[in-house]
Amino acid sequence: MASTLVPLLREPDRPALDALLAPAVQFHSPFADYAGHDDVSHLISTIATVVHDVEPTRVLEDDDGRTTFIDGRVDDRTLQGVLDERYDDAGQLVDATLFIRPYATLRVAMAHMGAALEADPLPSKR
């Protein structure tokens, strides 16, 4: 299983992200839960502007997905996270869940996400 969201959280690449996401993809995160290719693509691109220096620390894979433990930062705060991804038979992402801790860093990230999404709303909200 070659493709994953982790590099796209480091450096957004919209064509690669669009190719990776299934049309009915679902994304669950502390920021919000969204479904649909356009909203999820926009949300992940926005997360990549808020969370920086994302590096995988451990990867667990099974037949249909991957769980990646990540380290990163929001402003001057460090974070740890878990990204759980599930793929269809064609290799497209159908379901992803992102957890971030510690709570103080999550609050800072959520404030940044709120401001970013207010400035550039999700396609379904436009």
Image: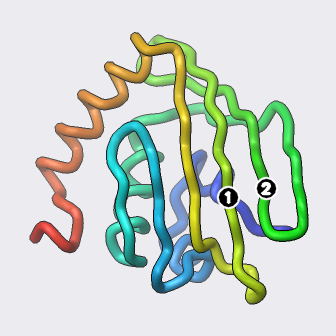
As measured in the structure, the alpha-carbon distance from the residue carrying label 2 to the one carrying label 1 is 5 Å
Chain-order first, disc 2 or disc 1: 2
Q: Amino acid at mark 2?
A: Arg
Give the residue at mark 1.
85
Q: Residue at x 21, y 72 (%)?
A: 123
| SS at circle 2 | strand
User: Mark 1 Cα within 10 Å, few/some/many (few <14, many 20+)?
Assistant: many
Give the residue at mark 2.
66
Indicate the position of residue 100 as horizontal and vertical percent values.
53, 29
Q: Quadrant of the N terminus?
A: bottom right
32 vs 82: above or below: below
Indicate the position of residue 72 as horizontal and vertical percent values.
60, 27
Q: Residue at x 47, y 66 (%)?
A: 26
56 vs 19: above or below: above
Q: Residue at x 22, y 64 (%)?
A: 122
Q: Amino acid at mark 1?
A: Glu
- Please identify the quarter of the rendering in which residue 75 is found: top left
Q: Which mark is residue 13?
A: none
Q: Are marks 2 and 1 in contact (CB under 8 Å)?
A: yes
79 vs 66: above or below: above
Q: Is residue 43 left or right of residue 92?
A: left
Q: Is residue 115 left or right of residue 20?
A: left
| SS at circle 1 | strand
- Please identify the quarter of the rendering in which residue 17 is found: bottom right
Q: Is residue 83 left or right of residue 48?
A: right
Indicate the position of residue 6 as horizontal and vertical percent values.
67, 50
